[in-house]
Amino acid sequence: MGDQRSTAGSLARDLSHSDGLETTLLLACARNRLDLETIKQIKTIVEEGEVDWTLLVRRALAHGLTPLLAWNLARFSSDSLPVELAGALRELLAQNHARNLVLADEVLTIVDLLETHNIPAIPIKGPVLAKNLFGDLGLRQSGDLDLLVPERCVSSALDVLTSRGYQLRESLSADQDAAYRRYWYHFELELPDQKILAELHWNLTPRSMAVRFDIDGLWERARTIPFEGRSVLSLSSEDYLIFLCVHGSKHLWCRLNWVCDIHEFLSAHTTIDWKRCLELASKQGCERMLLLGLTLAEALLETELAEPVRDRISADPKVRQLAEQTQVDLFRDGECRPLAGQTFRFFLALHGGFRDRLLFCWSYVTAPDGHIGIVSLPRCLWFLYVPIELLYDYVWRPLGARSPWLRKTVKRLFPRLRASAFPFPSALAASGESEAGSAESQPADG
């Protein structure tokens, strides 16, 4: 087998266990643009016939990479694949493309409707990102539609979406609505007939992450990009890259497709102003998140990094340490659902400097996030969301992890508890990151 286990990225050297071959093949296929060496590697692995196809497909599903896996295997090894597998992968790819066509049409419809009401909107992730990065709607899974609007326009935008047939996924009292707007960063809506989920954003992260996105600056730096024969607003290249790295960090980088987004973004955007990008990330309290995402792309997908980035990574040893641990965790089978304490420690490590770490600790403890759905409290009692959050995250969740009966009992007592109270991947289905109604039934990013 020679050197084939060591190419797709530096992680492969750590995968000497029995499923390392499948992981190496998945890493090799996790890109749109492949060099000759990687193409040769894919062909060699497939032709030798030692791949556990069930494990490979399961991994691809878990990491949101079935479209790229299907695309690259079809391009370079179609004759060597089991017939049933080849057919199934073609069908998955076609279904994903068809679903993204529906989402692309819907996002343009929403943007047009908002525009008629003088509401600017920036589509983020979803089919617009798929077309922007891959040039093909079918090569990236899109779970939902995400649109950023100015905070002053949120109520009007909700009215527009409601007139389109969308419904809020959670009924909120006036007090809960006000609390969500203060502590959270988007509303979740659903178009039941088409099983389309939409997230209406006024910010890009929950308050608990302590990332100080310059939202006014994002709008000032926004640009137009082509999409499906017309133009839509988009974040600037520097802002978008920072956002993608923060987004992956928010979900603990537990899926490879988020790393793939970074790799493809850098391949498609070769004129990034790195000085400006690093300054923006530092000012917004997310420089280490940016560096972690870039380090993972380099380690796993052999992404070429600019010299200023490499210098900054070298100056912060914690970035390499986080990247190494994340790589180890990335391919562990089983649900990625750390307890609150583990999540807190990971997020804390993502903040460098005493001031940023102190701000994060304060924000993490005092921002109730999804816990607002448990009970409606008047503004004068919002402070009670803090002990509710602490009891839930540090008492019930650890106990519930050990007792299915207790978990079911609490859910029955508090049916309005939102899974998005969890800032980790297991909550994606309820926080708009699921791909309800999409081509495949595994979790997918928006």
Image: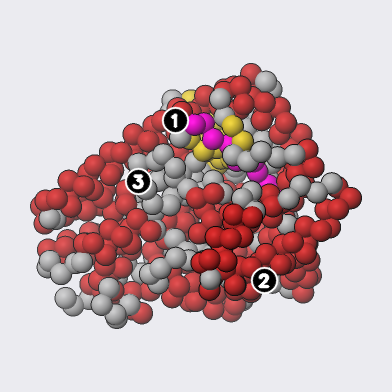
Q: Is residue 302 left or right of residue 85?
A: right
Q: Residue furthest right?
A: 380
Q: Earlier in the sequence, mark 3 or mark 2?
A: 2
What residue type is disc 2 on?
A: Tyr
Residue 26 part of the magenta segment: no
Q: Quadrant of residue 111?
A: top right
Residue under the image location 61 percent in, 22 percent down? 163
Residue under the image location 35 percent in, 41 percent down? 439
Disc 3 target residue: 440
Residue under the image location 28 percent in, 54 percent down? 69
Disc 1 target residue: 194
x, y percent for residue 255: 44, 60
State the residue in front, 359 or 307: 359
Which SS type dominates the magenta stretch?
strand
x, y percent for residue 161: 61, 27
x, y percent for residue 38: 26, 62
Magenta-tinted stretch: 184-192
Question: Which label lies toward us, 2 or 1?
Answer: 2
Q: Is residue 433 left or right of residue 34?
A: right
Q: In the rendered image of this protein, does residue 401 appear above or below residue 118?
A: below
Disc 2 target residue: 394
Question: Which label lies toward us, 3 or 2?
Answer: 2
Q: Quadrant of residue 26?
A: bottom left
Residue 208 seen in the current view: yes
